[in-house]
Amino acid sequence: MDSLVLVRCVEEEFSIYLPDDELTEVYTVGNLYNLLLRKLKPTPDCLTSKALYRIRRAMTAVLGLPRRSIRPATFLDDLLNEKQIREQWSAIAHESGLKLPSLRHTVEWKHSVQMLSAVLSFVITLALTKVLSQFASITLDNYFVFTAFFILGLILFAVIYTMLLKATPFRRSVLPTLSAGELSRVVLSMNGAEFTRETNGAAKLTQDQVWIRLVGVFCDQMAFRPEDVVPSASILVDLGEG
């Protein structure tokens, strides 16, 4: 989706105007969120703190860490064991009773899957060309035929790539957020019903409401899941690949 369209959607959602000069330093979801905080000046909220408390309590139980070692700025890489990360992540989700964002595949695994997907899509497309050429005068020398099979190959590549990633959850080992604070904000957007409270009649938006509504814009307009919209995600790179 064009970045200008995204900006217009955000402006409509919050009834504000975002001039170009204020968007020059906006590269990540977190940058955009902080810009909205400066523009809207919302009141503080404690929902993110509640989410962090639940996560911290689960981590101390599962990882055997002292409570004071887990702060909003604490890097998750420093807390979890790389060799046991899938088991620990699952245990933390169970202990907290919350939905956690899924672990992600490594860049190296994605590259391997891309190569395999490219080979398989090429072989399938070539085989289909040979089969169809036996029943009709179909050759790749024809521009329209070549274009049709090229598009088919691209579609097959996308389908195979997506299926292979979904079929290999056991290869996921990359944390979805950098810090405990980021994780608590993403968990809040994924578990809204767990942290609801009365806000009717509030004179101003709260900071947590701004975050949840911003995540909603990305999910509604760009078809992302809440767990994909993390503060550190690059709007043009990480989210642009969706």
Image (cartoon, rainbow, N blue to C red):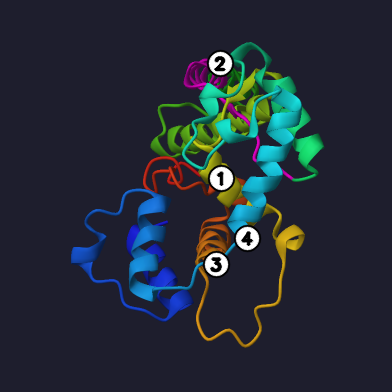
Q: Nearer the viewer, mark 3 or mark 4?
A: 4
Compared to residue 28, the image places residue 35 above or below, namely below
Mark earlier in primary sequence (3, 1): 3
Q: Is residue 113 magenta?
A: yes
* Span colored in magenta: 99-119
Question: Relative to 211, is 168 on the left or the right?
Answer: right
Q: Position of residue 65 (x, y in %)?
A: 66, 25
Residue at the spot of label 2: 116
In terms of secondary structure, where does tag 1 sit? helix
Mark earlier in primary sequence (2, 3): 2
| Observer-nearest of 155 and 136 | 155
Q: Nearer the viewer, mark 1 or mark 2?
A: 1
- Is the residue under label 4 in contact with that under label 1 (CB below 8 Å)? no
Kindly report the distance in space between the C-alpha atoms of the residues bearing marks 3 and 1. 15 Å
**Identity of the residue drawn at 62% across and 47% down:** 52
Residue at the spot of label 1: 228
The residue at the far top in this view is: 83
In terms of secondary structure, where does tag 2 sit? helix
**Identity of the residue drawn at 62% across and 32% down:** 162
